[in-house]
């Protein structure tokens, strides 16, 4: 049912794009996207078929009475597998066939039979079952983290860009380092926990920046975003896990609770991973929005609006934010890849049984058929979203001619 | 209408602006942070290199696997600035040794990325035509798979050797750099001096090397720093997940992965290497960003 | 004379830059009656744009204003916060230089026209729409109903400038500031825009400040002219007086640097040599002294003040120690020609060129 609804929605969007941007343009874009998708999945397929172990492994396998290319099956089935089982698996997966036949098999199964195949070959668990169970977790994680990131980045970006062009309160520059130094000294001698001390210092810097205003505030925000951007997700995730789940008992690693358990339980079970993923995405959006807004704030039309006597908030939100959001949405689409990377790490850190941790398990057990399917789905999601955004962009903003150059 | 006086006035304004920008005090604060970033990078590289060449004969280094019964899981101290691991191993020495792989991979992949990716981008952006279409297709195909997914994929279907890790990470760096260099080349190729050289009948390969390349260089250098930072993070993630070079080789990510197992006892094993990675990546990003700003006049005037 | 519309006294604007203090406007005073046009003429960088922006409260974050501005009898410093909110953009409005960038590219014309009316006058949407269409008609835009739904990029430069003018008129201002309204336009369109501004000014009994670098434009359109250089007024007066009896060497040089249809068609244009002073490090004396053909040693030491001396009518004033057309000025010019250089050390050959 959901599938059909999605299909209808998709068809409607496509129809609208064809109507507003012209059929040739739409065809070119979607055709290009389809080509990329086919090449991606075929590339994955090809890499799989070329890497079925080195010559000695192959010979060893042959001596055991199984196919030369059986190595992925052996790994998937584990050490206790019988020769028959392995051979059956090789037959199932078409490991003896050439690349093109393997790819055709895989594509036929996925597209025509609409069968995602098995998640774990050994116990016969299907991938669609696994996804039914695990995908919601990752999907909620994605959604909440993006909302968190936007919730932090948009107001901060607007504020920061606004402050960049203002005089500010002219507080002395040494006040911030001095204040931080004093705080650190007090904290050090009164035996605060390092994590609390760190939080206090950040809070102090934030309050100081908000109070100071002007260039100083903008610089501080920008530097904070820059620093946040430089923290690897796994370091950030582990640090927050230590602060909230180990040193203190604020976040319980009890495992995921679905919506049916109540919204409170649901959010309680997932807020920290969400925060980590959200904080990782925040500086990307923040810096982009800020730079874009500063550029737009220098445009003449802002002076014109000011000369018309419009209020600052009106100018910021109605005149400047609008052109800047278009870029933001584009990056939102591109950031899907970053999200998938983050999900793999965050789910690993917080033992969240989502698609990310499934991927790691599948890799470890050489469930390459399933991996290939998931890579294809992720790539399809990525390509489709970005093509849609790209085309929508052209359809919405008539100034932008479809630019194949970039 | 052309008013000479007006033109001169505009010129003088530009001169005044340039003067204002170069006046003492204007860029001072930035320079301090910039020097700090460079100093940190030099410090890290020198320490790791010294550790590589002289090993434990250095006064501040110990055997990273050396068991020390007196300091199991001990926190940072004067003797062991980064604390000790669960068998009392010196974390500082582990981090110094782990830096070999982390930094080497970072630099090697960036060099490969610049060489191959930069070359691809230059040729695609300057010659256009079918080469460009091909390169664009390669870029689009590679970049539509999330980076970590691609790297894990390659490492698992092959093996966890250093060459495989470098190969996998290069697959990320090459298209990313190719895309940036291509965009930059397109811009440069559109400028008057390139067109002029073409009109004069200079050989295209010569124009590419003598006119286009020097003007793409700044972008390339800036992004070399940024790419190194990204690669160090991805390699760190990979070893954190236990998918980079196999034990017993140490990397920064692996020290963190070990520290997180008994997290309550050894938070310093996460914090210290984490801090080192953070500061290194921050410095690389900062240097790259500043170089971008310095080279790019348009952005600098913001 | 009718009521005074604008009264500026001793206006100075400073910008604090990383390289030091920059005084962009320095001690400007002027008065403008209702229905009059006052042209401010100067090269770019002379501070005329900063001056005009200051009048409508558009100073950048690092700018500071001194001196008083009275618009329609109200000192803008005495306005309460709520009054100020509906003062700029209502009683005083501005038309900017470049119509290509003055309009927000992602908003339709109607939204941009109506927003000020909706905000300041609190009119209903439908009324605002009617008024907007009427405004577009007034600025002679054909089929305004259709234009309302278009984006700026669908209009030509001249059309856009008309929209910008309509936007400025939306709240029926009594004082209109036009900052080089025709500089960015084709020559053919320039005249029609200036005609339109004149027409609207007379129709609405508005006062207008016309900022331009073109003495020719100022001559045809303004009742009075102020010549600005390095943030100071060099010479002010009724247009006719000023052209009949030019006193400041800078005004003279400015006039010689633009084509003059009254002269023989192959007369050489005379550019002004040298550069305007660096305002971060302003000269001690007259700002123009270094490039001036009359400059004497005393010009380098003290700033001349704006004053009328015998020979001019009471509101024709100039700031020069050795004005053109006086025996003193002629003597100064002669002395410089003989010495081959002015007091600032610039060669007279460069200043006066082949006219010598």
Image (tube, rainbow, N blue to C red):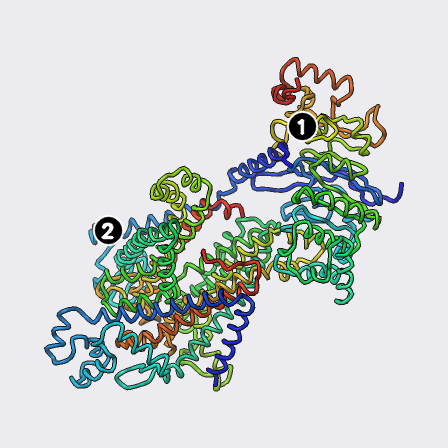
Secondary element type, mark 2: loop
Secondary element type, mark 1: loop
Whether residue C199 sits left or right of residue B157 in the image: it is right
Q: Is residue C60 above or below residue C220?
A: below
Q: Residue furthest right?
A: C1
Is residue A242 visible from the viewing direction of this image?
Answer: no
Residue appearing at x 26%, y 56% in the figure: B100
Residues under numbered marks 1 and 2 in contact, where contact means CB atoms less than 8 Å apart: no
Q: Is residue A229 above or below residue C25?
A: below
Q: Which residue is mark 2?
A: B59
Q: Which residue is mark 1?
A: C288
Residue appearing at x 33%, y 49% in the figure: B43
Pinpoint the chain carrying mark 2: B
Q: Residue furthest front?
A: A24
Q: Quadrant of the C terminus of chain A?
A: bottom left
Q: Is residue B179 above or below residue C40?
A: below
Residue A150 location (% of width, % of height): 52, 67
Whether residue C340 sits left or right of residue B223 in the image: it is right
Q: Looking at the image, how many numbered discs can be counted on the residues?
A: 2
Residue A370 location (% of width, % of height): 31, 77
Q: CA distance from mark 1 to mark 2?
A: 70 Å
Residue appearing at x 80%, y 49% in the figure: C200
């Amino acid at each position: 049912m959901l599938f059909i609804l999605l299909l209808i929605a998709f068809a409607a969007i496509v129809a609208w794009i064809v109507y507003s941007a012209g059929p040739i343009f739409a065809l070119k874009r979607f055709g290009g996207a389809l080509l990329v998708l086919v090449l991606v999945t075929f590339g994955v397929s090809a890499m799989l078929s070329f890497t079925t172990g080195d010559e000695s492994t192959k010979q060893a396998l042959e001596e055991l009475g199984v196919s030369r290319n059986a190595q992925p099956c052996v790994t998937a089935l584990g050490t206790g597998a019988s020769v028959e089982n392995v051979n059956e698996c090789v037959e199932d997966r078409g490991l003896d066939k050439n690349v093109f036949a393997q790819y055709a098999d895989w594509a036929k199964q996925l597209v025509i039979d609409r069968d995602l195949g098995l998640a774990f070959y050994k116990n016969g668990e299907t991938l669609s079952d696994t996804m039914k169970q695990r995908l919601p977790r990752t999907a909620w994680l994605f959604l909440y983290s993006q909302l968190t990131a936007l919730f932090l980045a948009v107001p901060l970006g607007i504020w920061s860009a606004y402050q960049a062009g203002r005089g500010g309160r002219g507080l002395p520059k040494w006040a911030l380092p001095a204040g931080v130094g004093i705080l650190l000294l007090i904290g050090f001698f009164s035996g605060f926990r390092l994590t609390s001390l760190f939080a206090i210092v950040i809070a102090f810097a934030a309050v100081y920046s908000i109070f100071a205003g002007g260039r100083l505030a903008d610089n501080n925000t920008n530097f904070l975003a820059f620093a946040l951007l430089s923290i690897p997700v796994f370091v950030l995730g582990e640090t927050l896990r230590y602060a909230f789940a180990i040193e203190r008992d604020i976040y319980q690693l009890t495992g995921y609770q679905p919506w049916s358990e109540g919204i409170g339980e649901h959010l309680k079970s997932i807020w920290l991973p969400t925060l980590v993923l959200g904080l990782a995405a925040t500086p990307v959006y923040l810096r982009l929005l800020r730079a874009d807004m500063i550029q737009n704030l220098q445009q003449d039309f802002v002076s014109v609006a000011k000369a018309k006597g419009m209020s600052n908030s009106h100018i910021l939100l109605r005149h400047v934010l609008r052109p800047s959001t278009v870029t933001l949405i584009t990056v939102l689409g591109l950031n899907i890849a970053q999200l998938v990377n983050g999900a793999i790490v965050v789910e690993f850190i917080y033992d969240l049984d989502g698609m990310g941790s499934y991927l790691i398990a599948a890799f470890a057990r050489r469930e390459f058929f399933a991996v290939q399917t998931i890579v294809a789905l992720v790539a399809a999601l990525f390509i489709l979203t970005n093509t849609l955004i790209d085309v929508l962009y052209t359809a919405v903003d008539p100034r932008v001619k479809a630019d194949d150059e970039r | 209408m052309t008013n000479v006086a007006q033109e001169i006035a505009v010129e003088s304004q530009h001169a005044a602006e340039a003067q204002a920008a170069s006046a003492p005090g204007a860029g001072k604060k930035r320079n301090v942070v910039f020097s700090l970033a460079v100093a940190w990078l030099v410090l890290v590289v020198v320490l790791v290199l010294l550790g590589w060449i002289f090993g434990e004969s250095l006064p501040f280094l110990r055997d990273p696997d050396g068991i020390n019964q007196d300091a199991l899981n001990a926190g940072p101290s004067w003797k062991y600035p980064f604390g000790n691991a669960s068998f009392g191993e010196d974390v500082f020495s582990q981090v110094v040794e782990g830096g070999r792989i982390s930094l080497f991979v970072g630099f090697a992949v960036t060099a490969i990325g610049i060489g191959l990716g930069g070359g691809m981008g230059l040729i695609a952006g300057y010659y256009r035509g079918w080469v460009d279409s091909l390169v664009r297709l390669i870029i689009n195909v590679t970049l539509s798979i999330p980076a970590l997914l691609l790297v894990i994929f390659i490492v698992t279907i092959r093996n966890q050797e250093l060459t495989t890790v470098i190969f996998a990470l290069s697959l990320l760096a090459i298209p990313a750099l190719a895309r940036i260099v291509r965009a930059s080349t397109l811009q440069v190729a559109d400028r008057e001096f390139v067109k002029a050289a073409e009109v004069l009948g200079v050989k295209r390969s010569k124009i590419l090397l003598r006119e286009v390349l020097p003007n793409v260089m700044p972008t390339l250098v800036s992004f070399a720093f940024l790419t190194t930072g990204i690669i160090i993070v991805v390699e760190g993630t990979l070893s954190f997940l236990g998918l980079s070079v196999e034990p017993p080789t140490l990397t920064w990510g692996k020290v963190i992965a070990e520290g997180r197992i008994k997290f309550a006892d050894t938070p310093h094993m996460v914090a210290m290497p984490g801090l080192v990675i953070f500061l290194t990546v921050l410095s690389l990003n900062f240097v790259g960003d500043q170089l971008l700003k310095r080279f790019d006049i348009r952005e600098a005037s913001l | 004379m009718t009521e005074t519309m604008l009264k500026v006294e001793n206006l100075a604007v400073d910008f604090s830059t990383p390289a030091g203090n920059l005084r962009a406007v320095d001690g400007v005073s002027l008065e403008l009656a209702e229905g009059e046009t006052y042209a401010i003429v100067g090269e770019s960088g002379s501070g005329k744009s900063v001056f005009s922006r200051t009048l409508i409260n558009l100073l950048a974050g690092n700018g500071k204003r001194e001196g008083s501005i009275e618009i329609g009898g109200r000192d803008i410093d005495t306005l309460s916060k709520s009054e100020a909110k509906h003062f700029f953009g209502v009683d005083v409005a501005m038309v900017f230089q470049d119509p290509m960038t003055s309009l927000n590219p992602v908003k339709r014309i109607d939204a941009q026209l109506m927003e000020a009316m909706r905000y300041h006058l609190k009119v209903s949407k439908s009324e605002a729409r009617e008024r907007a269409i009427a405004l577009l008609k007034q600025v002679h835009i054909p089929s305004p109903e259709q234009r309302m739904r278009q984006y700026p990029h669908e209009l030509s430069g001249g059309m856009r400038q008309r929209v910008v003018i309509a936007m400025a008129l939306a709240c029926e201002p009594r004082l209109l500031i036009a900052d080089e309204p025709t500089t960015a336009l084709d020559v053919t369109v320039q005249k029609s825009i200036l005609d339109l501004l004149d027409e609207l000014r007379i129709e609405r009994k508005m006062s207008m400040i016309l900022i331009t670098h073109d003495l020719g434009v100022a001559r045809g359109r303004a009742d009075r002219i102020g010549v600005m250089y390095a943030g100071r007024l060099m010479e002010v007066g009724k247009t006719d007086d000023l052209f009949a009896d030019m006193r400041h060497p800078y005004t003279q040089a400015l006039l010689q640097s633009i084509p003059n249809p009254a002269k023989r068609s192959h007369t050489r244009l005379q550019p002004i040599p040298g550069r305007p002073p660096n305002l971060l490090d302003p000269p001690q004396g007259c700002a123009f002294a270094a490039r001036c053909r009359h400059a004497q040693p005393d010009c380098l030491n003290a700033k001349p003040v704006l004053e009328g001396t015998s020979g001019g009518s009471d509101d024709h004033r100039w700031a020069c120690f050795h004005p053109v057309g006086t025996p003193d000025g002629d003597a100064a010019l002669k002395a410089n020609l003989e010495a081959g250089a002015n007091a600032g050390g610039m060669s007279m050959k460069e200043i006066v060129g082949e006219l010598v």
